[in-house]
Image: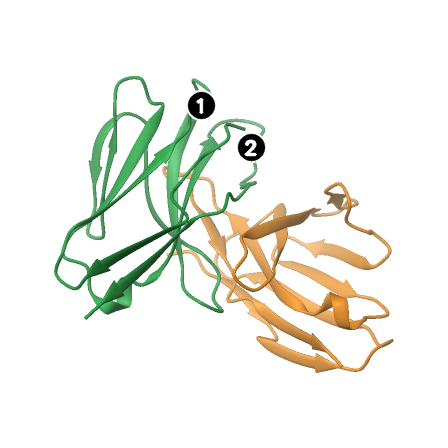
Chain colours: A green, B orange
Amino acid sequence: LAKTTQPISMDSYEGQEVNITCSHNNIATNDYITWYQQFPSQGPRFIIQGYKTKVTNEVASLFIPADRKSSTLSLPRVSLSDTAVYYCLPYTYGSGNTGKLIFGQGTTLQVKP
Amino acid sequence: GAVVSQHPSRVICKSGTSVKIECRSLDFQATTMFWYRQFPKKSLMLMATSNEGSKATYEQGVEKDKFLINHASLTLSTLTVTSAHPEDSSFYICSASNLGERAEAFFGQGTRLTVV
């Protein structure tokens, strides 16, 4: 599995857009990039996944450039409730993978009023 | 969406006793589930892969005799922490995947184990 690198922590203010970048230089051809969110004392929750270009859902956008060596999670107009740890993980989608995820350090986002 | 339920959410036990944690996939069958451990302000560490009807696969450094895993049905995996000690105190989380259009894993709520 590709190794990922994210900033350990980030601060933001309510209403701002937050962009969290993840480096994954050795991502494999059949790897997707997934992002998870974790609140204290809870299990992680899936946010978004992508392979290339841009993906948007009701929660976030994910930008993956053509070389796929990095990805950027964009959270529009954050609120205090977005304070959490955000994990970027490669996921080898296809036969043989049963859902195993290896977590890196994650990025702790602190949203301030 | 698919839900994974974990029970109990919090447990306190005495040193030397055993504790069982249940992980259920509520609306899909999971031939494979995963158990993670998380220390305060740290990331999730994969402990083992629970395989329905067969032995679990443990990650390097995880004692299989300390952390017994049973996956007797397609919707239930259990983790038993045997002869618990204070250093086993941690947050334990299970997950399962319903591999469909999204590469999405569903996580339980987690179990806070405190050994006194």
The quarter of the picture where residue A33 lies is: top left
**x, y (%) of residue A102?**
55, 41
Instruction: Write the residue at 81% across / 73% down.
Output: B18
Return the residue nearer the eye: B9 or B29: B9
Q: Which residue is mark 1?
A: A27
Q: Amino acid at mark 2?
A: Asn
Horizontal and vertical percent position of residue B39: 60, 61
Q: Position of residue B113 (x, y in %)?
A: 66, 73
Residue B16 image-quadrant placement: bottom right
Which badge, 1 or 2, is on the more N-terminal residue?
A: 1
Kindly indicate the quadrant of the structure image that contains residue A85: bottom left
- In three-dimensional space, the C-alpha distance between marks 1 and 2, rounded to whole angstroms, equals 16 Å
- Mark 1 is on which residue type? Ile
For mark 1, give the secondary structure.
Answer: loop
Q: Residues within 10 Å of mark 1 (few under 14, many from 20)?
A: many
Up-down: is A96 above or below B20? above
Q: Nearer the viewer, mark 1 or mark 2?
A: 1
Mark 2 = which residue?
A97
